[in-house]
Image: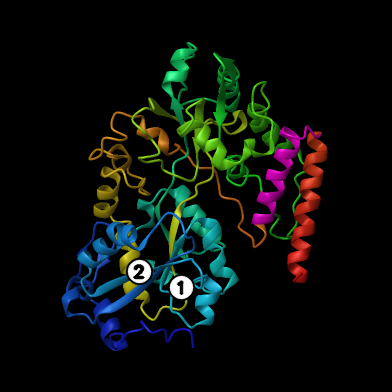
Amino acid sequence: MRKKGAMALILLPLAMVLGACSQNNGSADDNGARTPDSAIQADKKEPVELVFYYPSANDWTADTFMDTFGEPIKKKFPHITPVFMQYGKGTSLPELLAAGQRIDIYFGSPGATRTLEDHRLQYDIMPLIQKYKYDLDRLNPGLVSVARALAHGGMNSLPVYVPPSAIYYNKDIFDKFGVAYPKDDMTWDDLYEISKKLTRTDSGMNYLGLTAPVGTLNPLNSLSLPLIDPTSEKANFQTDPWKSFITNISRNFMLPGYDNDLKALDVGRQRNFFFQEQRAAMWIALTNLHKQPEITNALNWDIAAIPTFKEAHGVGPQAYPTLFSITALTPHPDEAFEAIAYLTSDDFQMQQSRAGMMLPVLQNPAFLQAFSQDSPLYKGKNVKALVPAKYADSISFTAYNGYGTTGLLNAMIDYVLKQKDINTALREATEFTNQSIQTAKSGK
């Protein structure tokens, strides 16, 4: 059985757990939950190990995980010992499952979290939310909607931190060409007018108005346009809304002077144009909170809110939080919930926000206002722009959304770099995506 991993330890007898949880004389925790006496008297509880798994070889190491999450959990709950594992050679999720390795908590992006359903590892945390009277209303509703969409209306995870949805901009380039800085209440039309003024050649330097992770803009689109229809499990990008969205975004990369080669829309190169080469005036951030040494002292920068569409004014992109999910493999669901609930507590969220380590997931604006107060990097910056006033509604998550993301990126590359007609590009993207889905279904 998978649950017999080497790190599995003995739970409290069920009667003791149920008895402790039935008491009403606990205290209120800063996550809005009632904490039973069994959780307060953690030193009297049997020790357990909780295995946290991260499905990427990037972003986190054992040391950074322990510094950020593990040690605070251990300090709050001395009976819990967090153990970190991540994707690597021999440690992919299928390999670990085949080896019988237990995973208690899985954390990652919405796309990565979707994998739990493929392996039937989802765990419904609503009974635990109700049992501990956890207050979901404390969390940003846009982030909760992502968790609910992944669970098809239920709740299998809690959002713990969220990347920015904002524009970083190079003030020196704006000053050099006498262009006003971007504002928080811009539309994509406003952004394009700025981009036109700043995509130019001067003294042999090719300046670019806008850079962005173009492949991410499509699945997180603020119009909530679906990638895959959840009923038919097919894509249809040949619609007026998708046509309008792709052409609106793409025009920024079709201005004279923009490098017209295949790598020009590569996310790594786009990022380097802004942070390393410092010849791009603006960079849209959607998946990473940028930190030193990427933001160097030589970069004179600030932040503005991501633009919105006229037909959805004031609505930012869909949220892309990092979600912590209890898995069906765990023999310790109560301890696992204690741990992830603590990571959304006022205490932990304020500490991480003040340190500039991660953007908070709480609705209360005081937590975002405190961002980076203990760190000089973002001090004095327009940090309120890092989180949109309102996230767009999340689209449906299906097993085939990734094919839609690839198809739309191909369409944008064909339209921008190969100068294909937009209707042709979207038709071919639809055909590519649906063929990919059929191939996946047939097991080829």
- Callout 1: 10 Å neighbours few (<14), some, many (20+)? many
Q: Mostly what secondary structure, the magenta segment?
A: helix
Residue extent of the magenta highlight = 402-420
Pointer 1: what residue? 327
Residue 83 on image: x %, y %: 34, 71
Q: Which of 419 and 194 is in front in this view?
A: 419
Q: In this view, does 119 lie to the left or right of 76?
A: right
Pointer 2: what residue? 337
* Looking at the image, residue 117 lies above or below residue 308: below
Instruction: Point out the tag, 2 or 1, that comes first from the N-terminus.
Output: 1
Report the residue that reaches farthest toward the front: 204
Residue 211 on image: x %, y %: 55, 32
Q: In this view, does 199 lie to the left or right of 23?
A: right
Q: Give the residue displayed 54% in from the left and 81% down from the top.
A: 98
Residue 5 on image: x %, y %: 41, 84
Residue 189 painted magenta:
no
Q: Quadrant of the C terminus?
A: bottom right
Q: Which of 156 and 55 is in front in this view?
A: 55
Instruction: Kindly indicate the quadrant of the structure image that contains residue 388.
Output: top left
Q: What element carries label 1?
A: loop
Instruction: Kindly indicate the quadrant of the structure image that contains residue 207.
Output: top right
Looking at the image, what colour scheme do you see? Answer: rainbow
What amino acid type should be assigned to the residue bearing mark 1?
A: Thr
Q: What element carries label 2?
A: helix
CA gap, disc 2 and disc 1: 11 Å
Q: Which of 153 and 212 is in front in this view?
A: 212
